[in-house]
Image: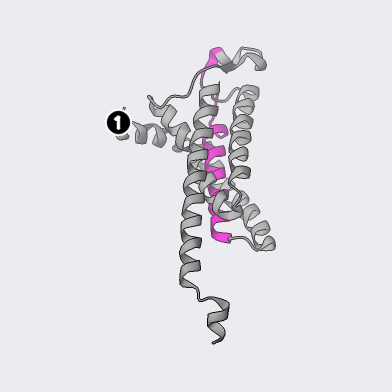
Amino acid sequence: MSMGQDADLAERILNQPLVAAAMVAGCVVIGFAALVPAKWRGRRRVPAVLAGFGLALALAVTLGRSGVLDPDIATLDPLRRCVENDFALASTKQRLNFYMLMPFAFFATLTVRRPWLVMVSCAALSAGIELTQALIAVGVCDSQDFYNNTVGGVIAVIAAWGLDKLVSTGKRAVEPDAATARR
């Protein structure tokens, strides 16, 4: 699979009218919903809004699609609509699922500065999406999607945490010591 094939699949998903509408509406609603508590709690506002946008994107592409993608799955009992697979990055769909929660996880980590909380949130969010797909028969409830989403989210959390530590260490090295500043 090539980057071109990945981009083609992403474009087909994003060109669906319900996905585009859900993404725009989700960015406005979830972005604002992330901004308000960030402002109240004195957290970083821009990363909070960007985390909201990342969450809106993930929800739009997984739950905003129109129609049932696999009619055979739709006829099954909701509890039997889930497919068991292992983590893999061989196909375009698998890679897109790997990347899906990365923007949310990265910016949420920069906002709340609690990496474990964001990691657990990514796993819970991914499980919730997969179970919702099983219940409403949009997409396929696939354990591989859960694994790929969660691992991608965890990697983004680690990257954001490392970047935050690097930047905050650099700031401390540049800021004058309080005792030195008084002299």
User: Is residue 140 something that shows in the picture?
Assistant: no
- Residue 10 lies in quadrant: top left
In reply to whether residue 134 is colored magenta, the answer given is no
Residue 50 position within the rendered picture, expressed as x and y whole percent measured from the top left:
53, 53
Q: Which residue lies at the image location 57% right of the left edge and 85% below the top edge?
A: 182
Quadrant in which the C terminus appears:
bottom right
Asked if 51 appears above or below 145 in the picture, the reply is below
- Region in magenta: 45-72
User: Is residue 62 something that shows in the picture?
Assistant: yes
Q: Name the residue under label 1.
A: 2
Numbered disc 1: secondary structure: loop
Q: Which residue lies at the image location 51% right of the left edge and 36% below the top edge?
A: 61
Q: Decide whether the magenta segment is chiefly helix, strand or loop.
A: helix
Q: In the image, is 15 to the left or to the right of 127? A: left
Q: Which residue lies at the image location 33% right of the left edge and 31% below the top edge?
A: 5
Residue 142 position within the rendered picture, expressed as x and y whole percent measured from the top left:
54, 22
Asked if 71 appears above or below 65 in the picture, the reply is above
